[in-house]
């Protein structure tokens, strides 16, 4: 019986791994396609507030259709659900717009190099705002992340302050999004896919008035005529592609969050950035100096180092917690 049981466990572990592997590969591939179309659109039609809004609108529409055709089950939500979702959505909206504004000003690769510094923001926010303490090894592992990002930033050929700050604000906002959503998804009855759908819809409601205030229909219409005359009707397909792929990659990432820990999720997210950085440099012929590439490599290696050290820290905290419970 025991042999059968362990064989069954091994088989279910293996199938879980395959499933997560498929999620990750799909998530990264969709993200690469999103980043390419997003930048193509922003180059020809530089209205990041509008394109950010359209991404959310496309996602909301896809999900409303899926619910009404019963392709996806309509979630059962109550007032409490939307109340806990609200802070997550505010942080998601800020992080999303800030990243898009950043990409409208600098190379996609630069935005993602700065965004690979997200773990450093996570530790600093947890330490200074939530009072959580970490072993020295965790703080030390932040040095290559911060140093690598700084080196990449000072040697970036097309440095732009708005582009840099946008990526930094996005890092900070997404750390809060992750902290709030960890609380929001705990014990929830809504699946990852539907959780992200509700997030998109609420985010769309929040963002639309701001997008109109910052850019507005007049600018959008004039810019669109210009883009249409330079690129042709293809620009509409590019905009549709960036919007749809934005929703799809986020949906798959939230579906994988159902299966994995937030830490594995953030490691997966950094690995995703490697594929985005490399493919966007190739596609957009981004000029890279060797020292600039070195900065990016150090930052990303730093993230791996951090993930190893924090894994040990979390593991030890769990053991400590279990021992305390046992003692009691
Ligand atoms: C966005 O527009 O929201 C950003 O591109 C998101 O970046 P990330 O999902 O890669 O963190």
Image (cartoon, rainbow, N blue to C red):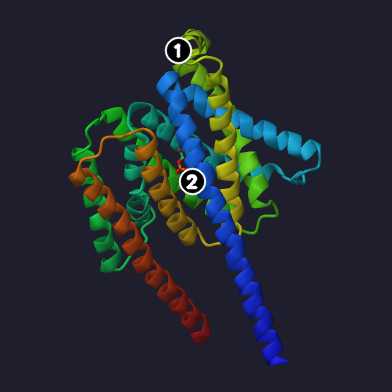
* Sequence-earlier tag: 1 or 2: 2
**Within 10 Å of the Cα at label 1, are there few (<14), some (14-19), or many (20+) other Cα atoms?**
few
Query: Vertically, is 25 above or below 278?
Result: below
The reply to whether residue 169 is visible in this rendering is no
**Closer-to-camera residue (56/7):** 7
- Viewer-side residue, 127 vs 289: 289
Q: Secondary structure at mark 1?
A: helix
Rendered image quadrant of residue 308: bottom left
Q: Which residue is mark 1?
A: 230
Depth check: 20 or 144 in front? Answer: 20
Q: Residue at x 35, y 48 (%)?
A: 116
* Residue 150 on image: x %, y %: 22, 45
Q: Which residue is mark 2?
A: 177
Residue shown at the point (34%, 27%) measured from the top left? 105
**Residue at position x 58%, y 55% from top?**
23
Asked where in the image residue 267 lies, by quadrant, the reply is: bottom left
Residue 280's place in the image compared with 5, above or below, is: above
Q: Position of residue 140 (x, y in %)?
A: 24, 63
Indicate left or right for 14 with 28 as reference. Answer: right
Left or right: where 153 falls relative to 54: left
């Amino acid at each position: 019986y025991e042999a059968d049981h362990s064989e069954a466990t091994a088989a279910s572990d293996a199938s879980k791994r395959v499933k997560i592997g498929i999620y990750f590969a799909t998530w990264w591939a969709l993200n690469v396609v999103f980043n390419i179309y997003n930048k193509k659109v922003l180059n020809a039609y530089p209205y990041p507030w509008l394109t950010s809004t359209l991404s959310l609108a496309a996602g909301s529409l896809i999900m409303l259709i899926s619910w009404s055709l019963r392709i996806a089950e309509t979630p059962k939500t109550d007032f409490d659900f939307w109340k806990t979702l609200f802070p997550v959505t505010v942080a998601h909206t800020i992080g999303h717009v800030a990243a898009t504004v950043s990409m409208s000003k600098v190379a996609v690769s630069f935005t993602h190099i700065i965004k690979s510094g997200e773990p450093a923001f996570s530790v600093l926010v947890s330490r200074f705002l939530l009072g959580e303490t970490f072993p020295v090894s965790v703080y030390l592992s932040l040095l290559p992340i911060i140093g690598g990002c700084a080196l990449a930033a000072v040697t970036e050929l097309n440095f732009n302050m708005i582009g840099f700050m946008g990526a930094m604000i996005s890092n900070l906002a997404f750390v809060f999004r992750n902290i709030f959503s960890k609380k929001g998804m705990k014990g929830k009855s809504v699946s990852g896919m539907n959780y992200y759908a509700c997030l998109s819809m609420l985010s769309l409601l929040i963002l639309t008035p701001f997008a109109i205030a910052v850019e507005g229909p007049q600018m959008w219409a004039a810019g669109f005529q210009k883009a249409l005359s330079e690129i042709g009707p293809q620009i509409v397909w590019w905009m549709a592609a960036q919007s749809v792929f934005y929703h799809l990659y986020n949906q798959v990432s939230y579906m994988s969050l159902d299966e994995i820990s937030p830490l594995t999720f953030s490691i997966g997210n950094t690995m995703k950035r490697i594929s985005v950085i490399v493919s966007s440099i190739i596609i957009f012929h981004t000029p890279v100096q060797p020292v600039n590439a070195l900065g990016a490599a150090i930052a990303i290696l730093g993230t791996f180092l951090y993930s190893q050290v924090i894994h040990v820290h979390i593991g030890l905290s769990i053991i400590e917690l279990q021992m305390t419970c046992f003692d009691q």
